[in-house]
Image (spheres, coloured by chain):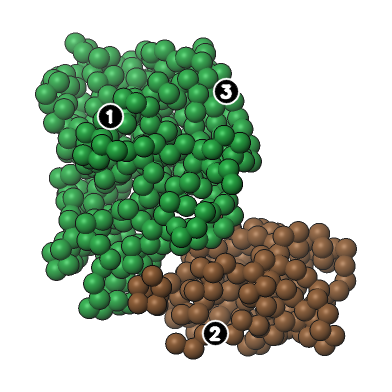
């Protein structure tokens, strides 16, 4: 099986509040409201992404394949709904970059082979530095955690690399695509 | 590298020495699915691994305990899906007569110090009672574990909770765990492993350790590890036939994110008022709260020792005429012990309803639900609205539950 791309390039969505600070505690109801839980077709999930997050309801209309989403701490806290993960690949979003994630969300995202990157201290770093702007083109290296500005090639943020476990699952496109034959 | 107990256990099941924060592949000694979630595990296995073998059938089980025997058609169908698949593959089923899966695993000597066990039960961290790592997971994770015999896990940070002093009847392990919940709250152990130590913990019997370990879920914790003392180690050796068992103990100087020390001398009977398990107060601080129903059982307080406490209090007395009292042994083995010790007879004569073993009050409907306005004292672990019905549930020890059954209001013996 061909290995997946480890360097992702795309526009970065900075999910910020009125004070231009990355939003913390974006829960699964803000990401994918429980009114739409009956949806099981991944293609239909994207249109509801961030449908309940104040000031960001335009996200599904404006997001493009290849985009990357950045937010603050405890992203995806709340329920175990898988749609809150799947609504992003549904729109072609390739990765999330946050300071931290809710525990169940993290497990769901890793199991579905969706890259979620952790950057310790991200919220404070972005308050201090204006090195990264909304919808700027960036690249994230999943194996090093380094975020660069595409235009200048300059390193703008240092995150954690995905763990070998995450890479294994990412490569095959989901936990249940992995079996003893390709991981022992 | 100085390691905590959980780091040691996971290292022993991984290809390297792990430390907190790492996400690692972890080998599993047991993987199981209950009637809750089991049918989806089978569906995932058939969809993703059609015609493929499972890793090690001797370590793979179904345990039916949620709605036993099934009292509705969806559960009956799900149980039959699991039975048919188990027969096709050669997996052992602990069927609807066996009791709560986690307890059966301990009784059968399949959950041993240092082992790793996963299943579709969110209270599998009960295995901390024998110094093992247990974890509830979703149906995709468990299907993967059935197929492969390993799973991934993020090694948790550890905290220590040292419980010193001495507790005396009627205070029990349940009051101890409620006191800890009162102290640290529902997020006090969020994402962490706990190591329980101290004189109170050392003296707890296996039933008491099960009670303590089972409510780590309600503290937000991953697992609460209790290192077996000699008596419990000997008991586990006898159950399993593994006479070389050694408990896993943290290294001197291992790193903990927090250490909490509590002196439990003078601890009084405690109770968690609705609607949250950490809403803990002293029983003596409550005004006269009239009670409609009593439930003794669950994975938290469903052992023979728990029912013996209740029988001792109820002996020769009657359940209050306005109170309904429900008794659900955790397992068939517990039921057998209760029969031999005369506990079944005593509780029956006092007026209690005695059910077959299983999850009982926490699982929808096995032994009825509470109605709106009904006040229940339960020995289980969760009192969220709707969990045990529409009524209001207080969480307390078997002693408080039995004493309240007699007086008709919340009472400590």
Which mark identifies residue B262? 3
Foreground of the two, B352 or B344: B344
Q: Which residue is mark 2?
A: A4
Foreground of the two, B152 or A92: B152
> What secondary structure is marked by label 3?
strand
Q: Is residue A176 above or below residue B238?
A: below
Sequence order check, earlier mark of 3 and 1: 1
Q: Please report, as a chain letter, where disc 2 is located.
A: A
Colour chain A appears in: brown
Distance (Cα) linking label 3 and label 2: 51 Å
Front disc: 3 or 2: 2
Q: Is residue B12 above or below residue B237?
A: below
Foreground of the two, A21 or B340: B340
Q: Is residue A72 above or below residue A92?
A: above
Colour chain B appears in: green
> What secondary structure is marked by label 2?
loop
């Amino acid at each position: 099986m061909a290995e997946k791309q480890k360097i992702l390039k795309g526009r970065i969505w900075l999910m910020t509040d009125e004070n231009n600070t990355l939003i913390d505690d974006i829960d699964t109801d803000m990401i994918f409201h429980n009114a739409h839980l009956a949806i099981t077709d991944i293609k239909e999930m994207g249109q509801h992404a961030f449908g309940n997050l104040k000031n960001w309801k335009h996200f599904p209309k404006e997001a493009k394949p290849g985009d990357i989403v950045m937010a603050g701490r405890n992203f995806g806290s709340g329920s175990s709904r898988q749609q809150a993960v799947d609504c992003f690949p549904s729109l072609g979003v390739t990765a999330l970059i946050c300071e931290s994630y809710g525990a169940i969300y993290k497990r769901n995202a890793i199991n579905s082979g969706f890259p979620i990157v952790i950057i310790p201290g991200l919220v404070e770093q972005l308050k201090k530095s204006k090195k990264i702007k909304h919808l700027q083109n960036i690249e994230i290296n999943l194996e090093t955690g380094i975020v660069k500005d595409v235009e200048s090639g300059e390193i703008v943020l240092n995150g954690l690399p995905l763990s070998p476990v995450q890479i294994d699952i990412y490569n095959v496109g989901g936990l249940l695509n992995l079996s003893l034959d390709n991981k022992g | 590298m100085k390691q905590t107990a959980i780091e040691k256990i996971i290292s022993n099941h991984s290809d390297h020495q792990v430390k907190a924060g790492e996400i690692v592949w972890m080998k599993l000694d047991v993987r199981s699915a209950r009637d809750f979630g089991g049918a989806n595990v089978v569906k995932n296995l058939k969809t993703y691994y059609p015609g493929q073998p499972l890793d090690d059938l001797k370590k793979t089980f179904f345990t039916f305990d949620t709605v036993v025997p099934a009292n509705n058609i969806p559960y009956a169908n799900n149980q039959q899906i699991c039975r048919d698949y188990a027969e096709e593959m050669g997996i052992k089923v602990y069927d609807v007569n066996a009791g709560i899966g986690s307890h059966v695993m301990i009784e059968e000597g399949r959950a041993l110090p240092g082992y790793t066990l996963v299943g579709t039960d969110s209270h599998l961290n009960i295995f901390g009672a024998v110094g093992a790592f247990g974890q509830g997971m979703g149906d995709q994770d468990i299907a993967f574990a059935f197929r492969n015999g390993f799973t991934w896990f993020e090694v948790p940070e550890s905290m220590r909770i040292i419980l010193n002093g001495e507790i005396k009847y009627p205070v029990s392990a349940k009051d101890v765990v409620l006191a800890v919940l009162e102290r640290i709250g529902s997020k006090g152990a969020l994402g962490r492993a706990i190591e329980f130590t101290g004189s109170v913990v050392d003296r707890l019997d296996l039933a008491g350790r099960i009670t303590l370990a089972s409510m780590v879920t309600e503290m937000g914790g991953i697992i609460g590890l209790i290192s077996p003392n000699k008596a419990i180690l000997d008991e586990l050796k006898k159950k399993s036939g593994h006479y070389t068992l050694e408990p896993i103990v943290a290294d001197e100087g291992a790193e903990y994110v927090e250490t909490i020390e509590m002196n439990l001398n003078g601890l009084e009977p405690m109770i968690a008022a609705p609607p949250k398990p950490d809403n803990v107060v002293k029983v003596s601080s409550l005004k006269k709260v009239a009670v409609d129903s009593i439930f003794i059982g669950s994975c938290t307080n469903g052992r023979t020792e728990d029912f013996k406490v209740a029988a001792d209090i109820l002996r020769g007395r009657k359940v209050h005429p306005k109170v309904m009292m429900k008794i659900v042994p955790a397992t068939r083995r517990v039921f057998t012990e209760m029969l031999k010790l005369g506990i079944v007879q005593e509780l029956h004569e006092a007026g209690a309803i005695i059910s077959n073993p299983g999850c009982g009050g926490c699982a929808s409907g096995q032994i009825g639900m509470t109605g709106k306005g009904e006040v229940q004292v339960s020995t289980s672990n969760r009192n969220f609205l709707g969990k045990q019905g529409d009524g209001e549930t207080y969480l307390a020890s078997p002693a408080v539950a039995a004493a309240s059954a007699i007086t008709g209001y919340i009472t400590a013996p």
